[in-house]
Image (tube, rainbow, N blue to C red):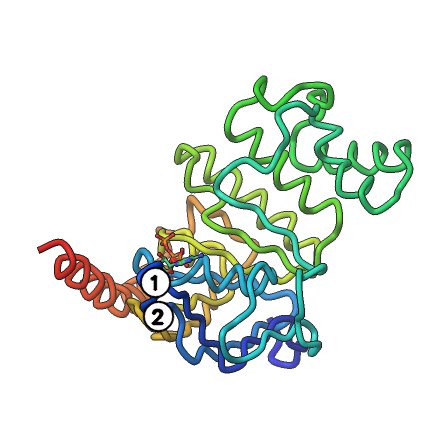
Amino acid sequence: MTQTAPDMIELKGITKEYVKPSGEVHTVLRDINLRIPKGEFTSIVGPTGCGKSTALNLIAGFEPPTEGEVYISEQRLDGINQRAACVFQTENAFPWKTVIDNVSLGLRLRGISKADAYDEARKWITRVGLKGFEGHYPSQLSGGMRKRVSLAQCLIVQPEILLMDESFSALDVHTRQLMEDELLRIWEETSASVFFITHDLEEAIALSDRVIVLTAGPGATIKGDYQIDLPRPRNVAEISFDPAFMRIHQQIWKDLKDEVMISYENANKFTS
Ligand SMILES: Nc1ncnc2c1ncn2[C@@H]1O[C@H](COP(=O)(O)OP(=O)(O)OP(=O)(O)O)[C@@H](O)[C@H]1O
């Protein structure tokens, strides 16, 4: 990643608060400043409940910040971010639609003819390794295959930003590594900026150009911002044996562990 790439995403002085049913204000994120260049693969890690999904929702435009602004390619975001696509932990695919109808949906919604949308969908179905399954319904596929459908559904619209919220965490470890490698392979062919949320520090390091560590909430801020200068292309199963990977892991884990401990202590205060 070159230093000169323009910003794709900028969070400028972002604070996000929710009002609890009791009327009490709960500050999730406080004064977050973050710039993500075009084409960068950024992961965000932090203790449970610190505000990772909240940050993603703000970039997606699902919710507005309480204070501060989100900029996408230097334009202030107001409403849904049309340049982004999301892959969540849960299924994106509609169970009553076949694979090809699910994958072509994004193009059909943009007014593209069924024949053209199907042509493009077939290319993406092949790219994610599902050739031959065009007429299957999601219930006839494994969890890993359904995740591939979700990826194809998102990537077919060629989003400039891919927002991924624990997208692979429900998969078994082998399927997950295959999907991670496929994601990297496809991402390397695009110029999409990826904002990837995970609980798994190894996954974050293996995939990313950069790992951001959030502090324990409430009022989470950025605790650490690490460049991951491991060579690409990467094989996620193998890179964790690289001594450089282990050094980076140790360094980031030091930051993260402290915040996880604070988060446990906070949770214990509530329950005791
Ligand atoms: N719509 C909402 N209304 C009120 N509180 C909310 C809302 N969305 C999130 N929160 C609160 O904001 C905090 C951060 O939630 P968020 O889901 O962003 O954290 P997270 O880091 O993604 O969590 P996890 O790691 O467990 O997935 C939590 O305390 C949560 O209860």
First in sequence: mark 2 vs mark 1: 2
The local secondary structure at tag 1 comes to loop
Q: Position of residue 232 (x, y in %)?
A: 55, 58
Q: Position of residue 29 (x, y in %)?
A: 40, 71
Given residues 153 and 70, the one toward you in this image is 70
Q: Amino acid at mark 2?
A: Val
Are the residues at dot 2 and dot 1 in contact (C-beta closer than 8 Å)? no
Q: Amino acid at mark 1?
A: Cys
Horizontal relation, residue 74 to residue 58: left or right:
right
Q: Please give the name of the residue rendered at 50% of the width and 38% of the height, measured from the top-left corner.
A: 90
Tag 2: Cα neighbours inside 10 Å, few (<14), some, or many (≥20)? few
Q: Please give the name of the residue rendered at 57% of the width and 29% of the height, measured from the top-left corner.
A: 145
Examine the image and state in which quarter residue 272 appears. Answer: bottom left
Which residue has dot 2 on it?
25
Q: Identify the disc placed on residue 50.
A: 1
Picture layout, residue 73 above or below residue 261: below
Horizontal relation, residue 179 to residue 221: left or right:
right
Given residues 88 and 44, the one toward you in this image is 88
